[in-house]
Amino acid sequence: MAKKENTKSPYEPHDLVYFKTKTDDIRKAIHSYSFEKIDQEDKIKLANNFQPFGSHFQYSILVDNQSLAPITELKIKVKIPHFLTLSRCYPPMISLPSLIPDKDSNQLTLELDELNEKSNKQVHLHFIPNALDRKGEIRTIITYVNNKDTIRVLDSRPTEITIDNISIEPKLVPSSFIRDFSQTPGIKKAIKSLGVAIDHKIDSEIYFNLLEQIFLLNNFQLVAKDVEKKILWYFGTESIIKEDILAIGQITSNKVEIIASSFNHYFLVSFLTLLSNEFKEAILSKGIIKSKDQIFDLECRYCGAILPYFPNQGNSIVCSKCNNEQIVW
């Protein structure tokens, strides 16, 4: 549920106790009557959009009140396929809404404040794919009370979602090609930054070697390697859609990061999902962690930027982009 921002001053007149007069009652009656006369039919609009955002997906919901009267008790219900995991909401909320499991989907509900006349509210839901080779639908239903105290319902059309599996073929390129490819006009870049939450310190060489093994197992061609700085550069081509991809693995600031560049953003999301899942499985099988819950995505919960480092447990960190302070674990 969205947190209401309290912007009222404690000294504003509406917080004081006063006695109503006949004039007050008349004004209120006129105001109420004028709202009831306004036609809201077909003037409350619902729009949504599903698109890649960084290493995951963003689902945007816009409720637009184009009438001259407010609506109240606004509720947004979203049905989500099981292969998507809700990671954060915008505007930022103290806690994520609870997911209610269903047969072929999960459902979440957001309750918003009154939506005033000639105004709109937009919510962004961010979802991380938890598996590849999946198909499903995402759908939004809103309910609200109009100016005649009638409950109205708006239902969006289902948005089809496909998370494709990928298969990489190695492609040999010179190391000088890396810079040119990453700066090509229209290229998309996405980063998966992970923090491993364990009590004891692990040599970064172990994570570095695991990343190298995962890239090689996925048929990437090694382009360059810097053992001292713990950075790997690989190149490959997706075997079905023939999309080139530059992939970088690095260990930095107590983070394990996979960076990818390609012209196809949907392909980048699938790729980063694949490699991050394989990395989690690898450190789980080696006994470095006991549960995948010990792996944290290092994205700012407010703006989505990558956090500068992985802090210790209970320590707060400030996002270098939006300056908001937060605790990761």
Image: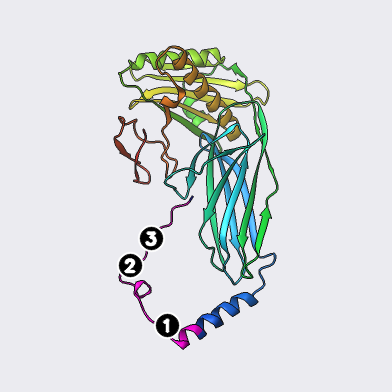
- Can residue 225 be spotted in the picture? yes
x and y, in percent, of residue 177 in the image: 50, 24
Q: Earlier in the sequence, mark 1 or mark 2?
A: 2
Which residue, given by chain and number where applicable, does mark 3 sit on? Answer: 6
**Circle 3 residues within 10 Å: few <14, some 14–19, many ≥20:** few
Which residue, given by chain and number where applicable, does mark 1 sit on? Answer: 20
x and y, in percent, of residue 310 in the image: 34, 30
Residues 128 and 105: in front is: 105
In the rendered structure, does residue 18 fall within the stretch colored magenta?
yes
Amino acid beneath label 2: Ser
Q: Relative to residue 300, is residue 180 drawn left or right?
A: right
In the rendered structure, does residue 182 fall within the stretch colored magenta?
no
Which residue, given by chain and number where applicable, does mark 2 sit on? Answer: 9
Residues 39 and 32: in front is: 32
Quarter of the figure that contains the C terminus: top left
Residue lying at 49% horizontally and 45% vertically, measured from the top left: 89
x and y, in percent, of residue 5 in the image: 40, 58
Q: Earlier in the sequence, mark 3 or mark 1?
A: 3
Magenta region, residue range: 2-25
Tell me where residue 270 sits by quadrant: top right
Q: What is the C-alpha distance between the residues marked 1 and 2?
A: 22 Å
Q: Relative to residue 101, is residue 14 drawn left or right?
A: left
Q: Look at the picture and state if 136 lies above or below 242.
A: below
Element under disc 1: loop
